Amino acid sequence: MNKKISFWQLDKLSSDQQEQLLQRTESDLSNYMTQVQPIIEQVRQQGDVALVEFARRFDDAHITADQLRVDASEFDAASAQVDEQTLTAIRFAADNIRRYHEAQKPGEMTMQEVRSGSFVGERFLPIPSVACYVPRGKGSFPSVLLMNAIPALVAGVKRTIVVTPPGADGSVDAATLVACREIGITEVYKCGGAQAVAAVAYGTETLPRCSKIVGPGSPWMVAAKQLLSSRIDPGIPAGPSESIVFADDSVDGALAALDLLIEAEHGPDSSAYLVTTSAEVAEAAIAAFPEHWSNMSAQRVEYSSTVLSGLMGGVVLAGSTEQAFTFINAYGPEHLQILSTDPWQYLGRIENAGEVLLGQHSPSTLGNYVLGCNAVLPTSGAAATVSPLGVMDFMKFMSVAYVTETGYPEMAEQARVLATYEGFDGHANAVSELRKKYLR
């Protein structure tokens, strides 16, 4: 491994150079949108025929239209392939994820009396359908299936389906199918990338049209979701993985390097920074990467070293804690780890992050798989305004109001004044003396 880790000193960077560090793969999707548009149009016009062609072209999978939906025999075959240890881990993760999200679910209805005799509230309902996207291009992700689908099931979504790219042999990842069966998902479709987004946005002969699509994916998928946002709710922006590990001088820099590789190994389009105020921590981290890489596969070494030696990763040395967290909040990372023997001292400084994992025993690995909090998180700085995937992403609420006979006069008088001021005669008349002669 001869790639040099990128090293950035914030004190020595211009504002433009610091801004460059905030960029992600999907920061400019214009090129991807140009490539995705004809894919979308072909799916819209040709349906299953287009999906079969794109499976061959993009996934090297030779399947027929009647093989787009996973059948019962494929679920059975998957169950036979997954060992007991993996099944136990899937069940453990699913249980924690379900517990976390059940605590998020609101009651069926709320009501409060804002004035005597006047009540307002909300009634909560699940959305009708959702497609959960499970990527596969750079690995297999049953954990993503659990994170996507369990909150939808907890919310009570009437139809929850899964779309995921087929392997070269036309199969779906076995552990993903086992995870589906464990939580009660029966509709799984062999379809990935931009074409999957188009398929559930328009519907095909086999795939149903859905109200929403959730889940992380490639820039092509992110571009497709943006282009089709008028046809389908694209969910939270969830592109290639990104992380910041903040480490102060109370921890070993080699530990920071170990944790930085968690998200960096997802793919060459990921982003990953170690941010520290300690030159010693920075030096120790850089020195530790070769040893950590010696315990990783060649593919994961290639992915992570590409990220950490490029323009969207590496080690960032800040001149002060304030400067460090100014950078972190400007970046708004998907995953933020705080490595310190006293991590809670920093929590109040954090404004923008998809998730915050505190302390030396809370690596992103745990959040990605088993802690229960959702690992489908906003990317590309969207954490400034967007929350992690959760039960409320699969629910809506309608306002409910009820005014009694005793509560009506006060409400009517004040509403009439405002309606008259704004020049709406019909509004004003509906709460005037005219109303009395029609009441029963």
Image (cartoon, rainbow, N blue to C red):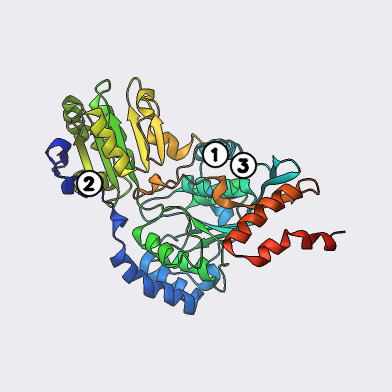
Side of 185 where 351 appears, left or right: left
Assess disc 2: are there few (<14), some (14-19) or many (≥20) residues with their C-alpha within 10 Å of its C-alpha: some
Location of mark 3 (residue)? 105
- Where residue 357 appears, as percent x and y from the top left, is 40, 32
Of tags 1 and 3, the one toward the viewer is 3
- Where residue 204 appears, as percent x and y from the top left, is 54, 72
Location of mark 2 (residue)? 21
Q: Earlier in the sequence, mark 2 or mark 1?
A: 2
Q: Are marks 1 and 3 in contact (CB under 8 Å)?
A: no
State the CA–CA distance, disc 2 to disc 3: 37 Å
Amino acid at circle 3 = Lys
Residue found 20% across the figure and 37% down from its top: 315
- Where residue 156 appears, as percent x and y from the top left, is 65, 50
Q: Nearer the viewer, residue 73 or 301?
A: 301
Assess disc 3: are there few (<14), some (14-19) or many (≥20) residues with their C-alpha within 10 Å of its C-alpha: some
Side of 87 where 315 appears, left or right: left
Assess disc 1: are there few (<14), some (14-19) or many (≥20) residues with their C-alpha within 10 Å of its C-alpha: many
Amino acid at circle 1 = Ile
- Where residue 104 appears, as percent x and y from the top left, is 58, 39
SS at circle 1: helix
Side of 112 where 233 appears, left or right: left
Location of mark 1 (residue)? 97
